[in-house]
C-alpha cells in the first residue's frame, strides 16, 4: 500500500493538557504495544497524518522521530514509514497452535480433490468482467439471497440437459457447496420430524453434521449394484443420503433396477433422498446415467457443486429442492447467513452460458481419462494381484487386494514419504471386509507424478 | 453457448429393439416433456451428438427433423438447434409464487444500503487478476476453511490500524457477512450455556436467529451516550449485542464513560459482547472512535463487513474471536459449510494490501459527506421543525419530529410513490416514545435524487 492512502485510528485534542507531539507519541506507542499496529505494517507519512488530523507537520515529525528512537517505528528515506520489526511488547496470544495449518501431501491419493492446477483462470476472469458489466446497481445489494436468477436459470438448463434433473429455477438454491447443502438438509429433516437417516456403508466418514442435528445414522450395505434397497426398505429410515451416479467411495454406479426400487420406496414411504451428485460430470467409457432426481423429483433433494468440475476453492454449489421442502430450506438458509457472493454467482452464470463450463469439462475429462489409463498401466505392472473397480466415472479407483495388508504400517510409511492414502476400511460404519481396499485418486496428479507415486506405493506395500 | 460444446444426457443401445432414430426421439421428447430440457435451451448440433454417441449422423438428423415437426425443437440454418419455445408439456410446478421476487424501491430511505452504483469494478477485477496469479495449486483446494491466511493477515493489520482492534490473524475468521457472524454467535452462546442476551432498544428489528437458538432477548435502553450500562448491570444478561461506534439505528456514538463501564461489566460478569462494527469506516466531522474490542479483547467478539464499504453483494465479512471462543466458532462453522470462496478472499486481500480499499473508502466518504450536506440543507428548508441526530458517522440520519405523525398513512403514501421508509418505532422491542422519528438513509441515492425524494417526502408528511 502506498502510505499516501494508509489510514490510522488516531486523534488529537487541541484543548488537551498534553502537546500534540506527546499525544501522538502516546497513542502510537500504545497501539504498537497493544498489538493493534503490527510489526512491519505501514503507518501514514507525516504529511498525510498531519493533513488528516488538520494540524501542522512538525509535531508529527517529532513524534515519529521519537518513536523511531525508541524502536517502535522504522523510518527510511523514500520508503513508507512502518512499525519496526523489533517493536517491543507484542501481546502473545494464548491461541490453539494448529488452527491455521493445513496438511499438504506431495503425492495425495486420497479421494476428493480434482486437479488443482487446471483452474481456468483467464476464462473465469473474462466471465467475471462480463458479469460485472451486466450487473445493475440493485444486483450489488442484499437481494436474491437464495441465488441470483441468471445462475438459477443457467443451472436449470444445464442440469436438465446434462444430468436429467427437472427443475424450475425457483427450486434451485445456490449453496457454498455440498457441505452447506448437507447442513441445510440435516436441519430441514429435523424440522420434518425425521429421526433416522440411512447412509451408504461404506460411505462418507464425516458424520458430524448429522449427529449434531440429532439424527441417528442407519448404515445400509452397498454392493456392485449400489445401495441395498431391500435392506433400506426393512429399516426404520425416513430419509437416505446417496451417491447414485458414482458411489462414494466404492465408485459403484447404481443399477436401473435399484434406482426403480429406490424411487418406489421413496414414494411409498413418503421419504426423502439427498442425492450428492458430486463428480458425475466425469464419465469415461460408459453411457451417462441421469440423476435420481429425474425419477422421483418430489422426493429427491439434489446437490451439485463446482468443487470437482472447477475447484473446491470456489465454494459454489447448488441444491434442487422438491417444492414442498423449498420453504424449509429457505428458512434454514436465512438462519445461517445472507447467501453466497453475488459476483461469483453472476460469473458462474456467464461461464456456463458462454459454453466455457462445458468446454472445460471436456478438456478435464480427456485429461483425467489419460491419467486413469496411466494408473491402470502402472497397477497392471506393479500390483498384478489387485482387482480394480469404480473407474468408469469419477476421479478415483477402488483397488481391492486379495488379502489383508498391514494397513497401519503402509499408512505410516506412505505419510513419511509425503504420500496421503485412504483405505476403504475407514469408510465403514459397520464391519469392513477382511481384505484390504485402497482408494486411489488419479485425477489430482500429473501423469509423471502419478507413475512415480504409484511405483513408490507398490514398493511400500511390498515392504510392509 | 456454441452448440459445439453443449452436452446432453442421452444414450443409445446398439443392440436394443428400437432403431437409433427412435431411441433418440423418445429420449429427447421425454426430456423436453418432463422439463429437463427447457424451452429455448440449446441442444447439441447433429454432428456433435452423432460424434458423442459414436454413431452416424443420419439417424440424429432424422430424429431432430421429426421432433421439429412435432414442435419440440426449433431448427434454423446457421444457428444452434434449440428446444422450441412452443414445446408442449412443460411441467407446472407447485411453487411458492414470491420466493424469487425482491422489493425494489425507486427512492429507498431505509437504512442499511450503501451506494450500490459505486462498486469499484475495474479495481476489483485487477485485484482478482493479481490474486489468481499468486494463488498456488493448493490454494484452489479445500484448505484454509476459516479464511485464507493473506486476508487474515491483511485484516489484522487493517483492523489494528483503522479500528484499534488487537488481533492475531488466527483469531480472525472470514464470514459471509454479519448475518453469519450472528448465526455463529447465537450457536456459540447456546453452547456456552447463555440463555439471556441483552440487545439495544431500539435496535435490530430482525431477531429470528437469536430466538431460533433459544435465547431470550432482554431489551436495554439507549440514550444519547449509548446503551444504558447501569440497566444492563441490573439485568440477568450474560451477553450483549452492540453497535458502539454508531448505534443501529439511532446513530448515537457510545461515550468513553459508558465504554469503560461496559468493559468493566464484561470482565466482572465474564460476559460476552458481540460488537457489530457495521459502518464505522464512515465518519465525517468527529474524532474516530476505536472499536470496543480494543478495550476488552477477551470478552468482545468483533464483527466487520464489506457490505457497507464495498457492496452487500460481496457477502464477505470477518469476525475477531477471543482466544477462548475461537474453537467454538470454528466448530460451529464446520457444521455450516466449508468456508467462504477463496478467490474473493485472495482478491480482497490484494485489494486491501494495494491500498485500493483505503482509497475507495476516502472517495466514498467524500461522496457521502456531500450527500449528507444535501440532506441537511433540504431538511432545514422543508422540515424545519425536526431535530436531526446520528449524522457524525454512518450512512443515515435520525430525524425526530416534535409530534406523533400518522406513520401508517405516510408509509402507505410513500410506498405508493415507490419510496421505502423506516420509522424508528418498528425498531423497539419495548415501548417506543410517543413522538415520531424517521430514519433517513442519505448514502444510497445520488444528490439530485436525494433532493427530489426529500421534497416528495416533506409533501407526503404535510398531506398525511
Image (cartoon, coloured by chain):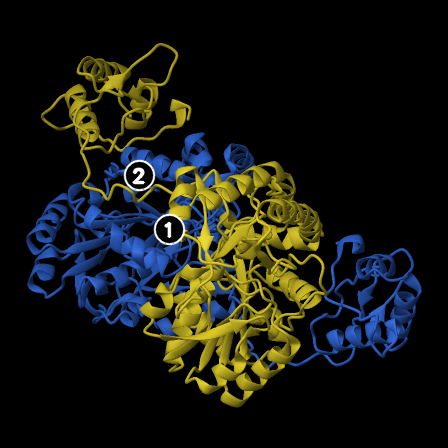
Chain colours: A yellow, B blue
Write down the chain letter for disc 1.
Answer: A
Residue A102, percent across and down? Answer: 38, 43
Query: Residue A199 or B270: which is nearer the viewer?
Result: A199
Query: Residue A340 or A272: which is nearer the viewer?
Result: A272
Write down the chain letter for disc 2.
Answer: B
Residue at screen point 78% across, 74% down: B27
Query: Residue B396 or B279: which is nearer the viewer?
Result: B279
- Rendered position, B99 above or below A136: below
Residue A339, percent across and down? Answer: 46, 59
Q: Is residue A399 left or right of residue B295?
A: right
Can I make out residue B385 in this image? no
Q: Residues within 10 Å of mark 2 (few under 14, many from 20)?
A: many
- The dot on residue B315 is none
Residue B65, percent across and down? Answer: 91, 70
Quadrant of the drawing holding the N terminus of chain B: bottom right
Which picture quadrant has residue B198?
bottom left
Q: Is residue B202 left or right of residue B74?
A: left
Which picture quadrant has residue A14?
top left
Distance, label 2 to label 1, CA atoms, is 36 Å
Query: Residue B408 or B67: which is nearer the viewer?
Result: B67
Which picture quadrant has residue A3?
top left
Q: Which residue is mark 2?
A: B169
Q: Which residue is mark 1?
A: A408
Q: Nearer the viewer, mark 2 or mark 1?
A: 1
Labelled pair 2, 1 in contact (Cβ < 8 Å): no
Can I make out residue A94 in this image? yes
Q: Residues within 10 Å of mark 1 (few under 14, many from 20)?
A: few
Amino acid at each position: 500500500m502506498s502510505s499516501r492512502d494508509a489510514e490510522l485510528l488516531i486523534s488529537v485534542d487541541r484543548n488537551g493538557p498534553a502537546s500534540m507531539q506527546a499525544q501522538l507519541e502516546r497513542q502510537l506507542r500504545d497501539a504498537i504495544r497493544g498489538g493493534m499496529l503490527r510489526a512491519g505494517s505501514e503507518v501514514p507519512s507525516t504529511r498525510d497524518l498531519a493533513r488528516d488530523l488538520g494540524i501542522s507537520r512538525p509535531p508529527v515529525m517529532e513524534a515519529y522521530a521519537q518513536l523511531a528512537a525508541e524502536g517502535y517505528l522504522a523510518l527510511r528515506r523514500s520508503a513508507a514509514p512502518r512499525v519496526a520489526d523489533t517493536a517491543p511488547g507484542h501481546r502473545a496470544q494464548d491461541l490453539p497452535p494448529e488452527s491455521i495449518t493445513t496438511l499438504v501431501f506431495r503425492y495425495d491419493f486420497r479421494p476428493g480433490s480434482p486437479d488443482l492446477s487446471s483452474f481456468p483462470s483467464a476464462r473465469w476472469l473474462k466471465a467475471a468482467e462480463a458479469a460485472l458489466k451486466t450487473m445493475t446497481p440493485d444486483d450489488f445489494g442484499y437481494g436474491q439471497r437464495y441465488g441470483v436468477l441468471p445462475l438459477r436459470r443457467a443451472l436449470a438448463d444445464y442440469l436438465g440437459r446434462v444430468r436429467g434433473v427437472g427443475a424450475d429455477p425457483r427450486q434451485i438454491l445456490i449453496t457454498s457447496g455440498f457441505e452447506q447443502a448437507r447442513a441445510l438438509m440435516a436441519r430441514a429433516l429435523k424440522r420434518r420430524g425425521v429421526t433416522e437417516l440411512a447412509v451408504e456403508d461404506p460411505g462418507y466418514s464425516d458424520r458430524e453434521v448429522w449427529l449434531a442435528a440429532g439424527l441417528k445414522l442407519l448404515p445400509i450395505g452397498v454392493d456392485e449394484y449400489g445401495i441395498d434397497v431391500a435392506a433400506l426398505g426393512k429399516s426404520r429410515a425416513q430419509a437416505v443420503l446417496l451417491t447414485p451416479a458414482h458411489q462414494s467411495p466404492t465408485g459403484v454406479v447404481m443399477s436401473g433396477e435399484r434406482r426403480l426400487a429406490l424411487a418406489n420406496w421413496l414414494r411409498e414411504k413418503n421419504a426423502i433422498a439427498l442425492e450428492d451428485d458430486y463428480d458425475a460430470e466425469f464419465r469415461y467409457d460408459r453411457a451417462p446415467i441421469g440423476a435420481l432426481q429425474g425419477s422421483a423429483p418430489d422426493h429427491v433433494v439434489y446437490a451439485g457443486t463446482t468443487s470437482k468440475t472447477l475447484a473446491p476453492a470456489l465454494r459454489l454449489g447448488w441444491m434442487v429442492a422438491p417444492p414442498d421442502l423449498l420453504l424449509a430450506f429457505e428458512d434454514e438458509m436465512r438462519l445461517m447467513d445472507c447467501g453466497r457472493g453475488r459476483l461469483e454467482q453472476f460469473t458462474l452464470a456467464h461461464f456456463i452460458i458462454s459454453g466455457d463450463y462445458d468446454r472445460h469439462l471436456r478438456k478435464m475429462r480427456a485429461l483425467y481419462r489419460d491419467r486413469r489409463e496411466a494408473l491402470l498401466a502402472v497397477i497392471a505392472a506393479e500390483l498384478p494381484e489387485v482387482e480394480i473397480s469404480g473407474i468408469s466415472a469419477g476421479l478415483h479407483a477402488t483397488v481391492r487386494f486379495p488379502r489383508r495388508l498391514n494397513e497401519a504400517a503402509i499408512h505410516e510409511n506412505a505419510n513419511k514419504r509425503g504420500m496421503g492414502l485412504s483405505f476403504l476400511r475407514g469408510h465403514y460404519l459397520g464391519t469392513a471386509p477382511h481384505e484390504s481396499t485402497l482408494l486411489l485418486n488419479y485425477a489430482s496428479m500429473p501423469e509423471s507424478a502419478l507413475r512415480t507415486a504409484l511405483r513408490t506405493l507398490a514398493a511400500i506395500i511390498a515392504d510392509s
